[in-house]
Image: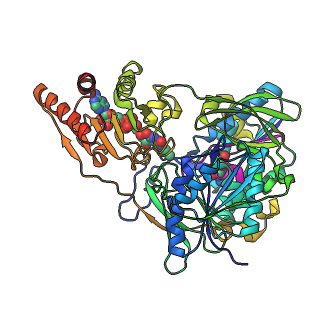
Amino acid sequence: MKVLVPIKQVPETSNVKMDPVTGTMVRDGVEPIINPLDLYAIEEGVRLKEQVGGEVVALSMGPPKAILAIKEAIAMGCDDGVLLSDRAFAGADTWATSYVLAQAIKKIGACDLIICGERATDGDTGQVGPGIATWLDIPFVTYISKIIEIRENSLLIERMVEDGYEILEIETPCLLTVVKEINYPRLPSLRGKQRARQTENPVWGPTDIDARAKNLGLKGSPTRVVKISTPQVTRNGKLLAPKDEKEIESAVDQLIEFLQEKEIV
Amino acid sequence: MSYKGVWILGEQEAGNVKSVSHELLKRGRALADKLGVELTAVMLGKKIAKEGLRELIYRGADRVIVIEDPALEYFLPEPYINTLEALIKRHKPEILIASATSTGRTVAPALAIRSNTGLTADCTGLDIDEESGNLIQTRPAIGGNILATIKTPNHRPQMATVRPHSNKPLDPNPDRTGHINYEFVEPTLFKSRTKRLEFRKNEEAGSNIQDAEIVIAGGKGFKKDEHFKMVHEIAALLDGAVGASRDAVDLGWATYPHQVGLSGKTISPKLYLCAGISGSVQHLAGIKTSETIVAINNDPEAQIFHVADFGIVGDLFELLPLIKQKLQAVKKA
Ligand SMILES: Cc1cc2nc3c(=O)[nH]c(=O)nc-3n(C[C@H](O)[C@H](O)[C@H](O)COP(=O)(O)OP(=O)(O)OC[C@H]3O[C@@H](n4cnc5c(N)ncnc54)[C@H](O)[C@@H]3O)c2cc1C
Ligand SMILES: Nc1ncnc2c1ncn2[C@@H]1O[C@H](COP(=O)(O)O)[C@@H](O)[C@H]1O
């Protein structure tokens, strides 16, 4: 089984600081990491390989330093990795990103399965996976929480939706986006890290993947970010800070009264 | 023919129109009125109840396009995407909005590629640019730390998804009139390389936080798994559902369907009562449209107090048992 895993390098955003004046992210000291939700995609690919044999290849579109994401994927058990990096790719929205990734996948050649993360924590759209599948005209499903069975020309899978789980059968080759319920990603191993250092990873530009210039980067993107601002949320509610037992009791009484006024209790 | 009109993609389950469709109609109505064009709701299903279709008109649609076929009974990507692509080619809407549900988030990105246009995910605001008539799409990005305003100036339709439960539907007005049009597409479009074999409903009590009127939530401030049951107890007292911050979910105190926030669910209950949650931007992104927010936190500087209608600075381990006791007393009375 040949599995491709598109991964994105993102800034470590769990503790981002925003510059209140410019509305941009303070990038000093922000580590680039693999999109946390892509670790589940890598893990699932590696597990499938361990189960049935085959090969897992990570691919990423991004700046030159995104090679670190590829290396980490290899350290986690991927066999190989390809970086798509070129000035022409910069500023791409999900339309242009999925185009480039689809072109690269065509170049890599026949694969059985593409596994994407549910979404990237920076762009946060979840659109690239379905986009890739559409460019490639292969079937796809989103929010997969379990690969139940690998069949001859299909996969039996479980999809997590709002009110439960669908059991689906999908023909291969296909693309899945996976949710974090699917597995526990492993940490890179020492041997893996060694292998990652020794592996040479190709870096491709537009001509390597026969990409049409007009579909690339900011120029090729149908959407335009026209403004960035920082969100403001405030309600002017009542705030009590009780100091002793009596005040605590009274605070809770006031809360219950408040809820009664609102006809909640 | 130029692109004209605003479309919303409605959703149904077992032939009943879902309320996310009504939420979209409110958004769509405002846009259609600004542009002076028709608002169309598109419904795909096996057999959709007539009252539900009429209600779409009562709640803002000028026209409902219905495609019925057994292949459309449940959502499957290919039949839905193929059908919608054909309808877009046929009618050329200027704007198409879908709900950011598991269905909408799956259909819309594929449809955008097929229709060679852009898509903005998870919009919190939609408006029309007075000058150009373009759709102005506002969405949180970088973990909710910024709001980005996005346009799709040169491609049509302009497509967006909006978070479910991020706005309230219009009240139905039975005097509103409109057309319900049953249309047909090539049956070959219903072909699917994915089959649905089974469905397992989530039976866990209190897990449907999006439909609950009351949500009681807890965060990392509970310190330990065993303490988290206080959240369940108060929720049970008020017939409410249980919510959790991402940290509480990551610690295994609650499962993912309970997660509230940017990467969890957006909810608009009548009451959101939370304790031990700091109120990160990502968490706030999921609760902003709640009618009433009550917060308990021992840190007077906690962000959650900025959005609370009623806050108590204090130890949740002292406050919650007392709240529980007093609620029980009120209930008995
Ligand atoms: C891309 C992205 C998406 C995210 N999505 C989400 C999301 O969907 N939902 C979400 O919730 N988070 C999300 N987060 C994480 C978010 O940034 C915060 O880390 C998280 O919300 C914090 O959870 P918390 O409030 O439970 O924990 P903390 O921030 O640790 O807060 C715990 C609070 O409990 C209080 N406390 C402690 N002890 C007591 C006591 N005895 N009595 C009363 N109060 C007490 C403390 O004062 C503190 O304010 C996301 C982050 C990123 C980067
Ligand atoms: N630049 C990229 N390079 C490789 N994979 C990507 C890239 N952007 C997105 N992806 C994949 O698409 C998924 C969804 O990303 P997004 O649509 O940006 O939220 C991610 O989890 C990755 O699997």
**Quadrant that contains the C terminus of chain A:** top left
**Quadrant that contains the N terminus of chain A:** top right
- Residue at (83, 53) in percent of width and height: B189
Left-right relation of B326 to A57: left
Q: Position of residue B328 (x, y in %)?
A: 27, 22
Residue A126 in view (yes/no): no
Left-right relation of B322 to B230: left
Total number of numbered labels? 0
Q: Position of residue B295 (x, y in %)?
A: 29, 38
Rendered-image quarter of ligand 1:
top left
Which residue appears farthest toward the bottom when viewing the image? B131
| Residue A143 in which image quadrant | top right
- Residue at (36, 22) in percent of width and height: B233
Specify how the rendered protein is coloured. rainbow
The magenta-colored residue range is A112-132
In-front residue for pair A11/A198: A11
Q: Is residue B194 above or below residue A215?
A: above
Left-right relation of A225 to A243: right
Q: Is residue A127 above or below residue B235?
A: below
Which residue appears farthest toward the front when viewing the image? B175
Q: Position of residue A21 (x, y in %)?
A: 35, 64
Residue B191 in view (yes/no): yes
In-front residue for pair B243/B66: B66
Q: Is residue A119 magenta?
A: yes
Q: Position of residue A38 (x, y in %)?
A: 63, 41
Q: Is residue A125 magenta?
A: yes
